[in-house]
Image (cartoon, grey):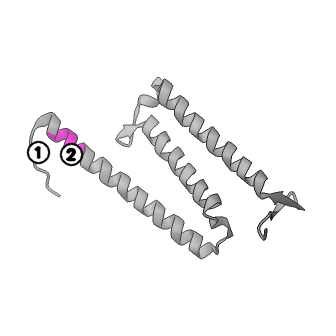
Amino acid sequence: MAHEHKLAIFRGLLKFKSNTQKIWGVLIFLTIITAIEVVLGIYKPEILESQVFGMKALNWIFIILTLVKAYYIAWDFMHMRDEASGLRRAVVWTAVFLISYMIFILLQEGGYVFNVYDNGFIKKDF
């Protein structure tokens, strides 16, 4: 196959890395991150229950780890590492902007809905 071996630079020496090695590396990396998420979800450490920017620190950790997994999947399986830097930046920065915007909207609307259920109707001036 044309892409059977990828060229990797390791400490100044040229070394060939097969696709099988890359797939195992990706599997191990994603498994470790998923295991961390599962362990945190089961045990829910008390120290991570504190509020950070309107949400529990544990929720922020879940969001960050999920974004790391999504980025790594796009980087490896969608072959973004092989694309031109301009295209990589366009894809990554667009996703970062949209995800940040979505988190902002969810926090704003979620806080408003919580206050409506908690205190009744609330008029907000924007």
The quadrant of the rendering that contains the N terminus is bottom right
Residue at the location (86% across, 61% down)?
16
Task: Name the residue type under label 1.
Answer: Ile
The quadrant of the rendering that contains the C terminus is bottom left
Residue at the location (25% across, 49% down)?
109
Residue denoted by label 1: 122
Residue denoted by label 2: 112
- Majority secondary structure in the magenta region: helix
Task: Name the residue type under label 2.
Answer: Tyr
Q: Quadrant of residue 101?
A: bottom left
Mark 1 vs 2, N-terminal side: 2
Seen as rendered, the residue at the extreme right is: 13
Q: Is residue 118 above or below residue 100?
A: above
**Could you tell me how many numbered marks the image carries?**
2
- The disc label shown at residue 48, or none: none
* Residue numbers of the magenta segment: 111-116
For this rendering, which residue is in front, 30 or 120? 30
The image shows residue 124 at horizontal and vertical percentages of: 14, 51
For this rendering, which residue is in front, 62 or 5? 5
Q: Is residue 98 above or below residue 122?
A: below
Residue 49 shown left or right of residue 30 in the figure:
left
Residue 7 shown left or right of residue 87 in the figure:
right
The image shows residue 27 at horizontal and vertical percentages of: 67, 46
Residue 41 shown left or right of residue 19 in the figure:
left
Q: Are marks 1 and 2 in contact (CB under 8 Å)?
A: yes
Residue 95 shown in magenta? no
Residue at the location (61% across, 54% down)?
72
Q: Quadrant of residue 29?
A: top right
The image shows residue 9 at horizontal and vertical percentages of: 83, 62
Q: Disc 1 on helix, strand or loop?
A: loop
The image shows residue 65 at horizontal and vertical percentages of: 53, 44
Residue at the location (46% across, 67% down)?
94
